[in-house]
Image (cartoon, rainbow, N blue to C red):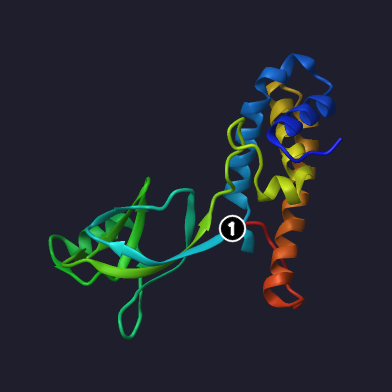
Amino acid sequence: MSITTFAELSTAAANWSARSDLTSRIPEGIALAEAKINRRLRTLDMVTQNTSFSITGEYVATPTNFGGVKTFYLNTDPKQPLEYMADEEMTTLYGSGTGQPTNYNVQGSNFRFGPVPDATYSSTLVYWLKVPALSSGNTTNWLLTSHPDCYLYLTNAEMSAFAKDWDSAKAWETLGYQILEEIAGISAKDQWGGTSMAVRVA
């Protein structure tokens, strides 16, 4: 059978696990698999940009499905890169001063900028998107379409872990991580035009 939708993935996970008693837990397994994928995978398919991201204050909400900064700079002339700075260091360095921001960090679902912006600044934010979560309402995404084996293996790793079958969980996880390595390798080849390089999943 094909594995192109949330329902088909759920059916395949049940078939491959051969555990009918875990069927109700499969959506949880898919969600946990996605959490691992989003922590580890960075590919060209996950990059997007906002060329007019407004910095309106010290704290500004991150975009929907934000998975991490790739490039961040002010649209000034010349362009001014925004550099990451740890929260404690930012607090110590900038105190209560204001000005053109030069640093940022991420606090939960918000960016924090330092110094506190003295005006609204336009910026370009190039960032990683999380893999869109599958559900009955969002039945597919680019990763499931292109690499259903990745979803299947990592979902079954979570199902085996739930059943406390640690040997099977490790075996499934190893297969899933191997697929993540292969996906990263394909992306690197597309980005670097076949240049020989070592690839490591983040």
Q: Is residue 43 visible?
A: no
Q: Is residue 71 left or right of residue 21?
A: left
Q: Residue at x 68, y 61 (%)?
A: 200
In the picture, the quarter occupied by the N terminus is top right
Compared to 72, does 15 lie above or below?
A: above
Residue 1 against residue 106 in the figure, above or below:
above
Residue at the right extreme, as displayed: 1
Could one spot residue 31 in this view of the protein? yes
Q: Position of residue 177 (x, y in %)?
A: 73, 48
Q: Is residue 88 above or below residue 24?
A: below
Q: Is 60 left, or right, of 184 in this rendering?
A: left
Closer to us: 173 or 3: 3
Q: Could you say which quadrant of the image residue 105 lies in?
A: bottom left
Q: Position of residue 48 (x, y in %)?
A: 52, 62
Identify the residue under disc 1: 46
Q: Is residue 120 left or right of residue 181?
A: left
Residue at (31%, 67%) from the top-left corner?
103
Name the amino acid, label 1.
Met
Q: Nearer the viewer, residue 16 or 4?
A: 4
Residue 108 placed where, x, y %?
A: 37, 45
- Provide the secondary structure element on which disc 1 rests: helix
Across the whole image, how many numbered discs are drawn on residues?
Answer: 1
Q: Where on the picture, by quarter, is residue 160?
A: top right
**Residue farthest to the top, as pictured:** 21
Q: Quadrant of residue 26?
A: top right
Q: Position of residue 51 (x, y in %)?
A: 41, 69
Q: Quadrant of the C terminus?
A: bottom right
Viewer-closest of 64 and 113: 64
The structure residue drawn at horizontal position 73% and vertical position 48%, both measured from the top left corner, is: 145
User: Is disc 1 surrounded by few (<14), some (14 to 19) or many (20+) residues within 10 Å?
Assistant: some
Q: Write the residue at 72% across / 19% down.
A: 23
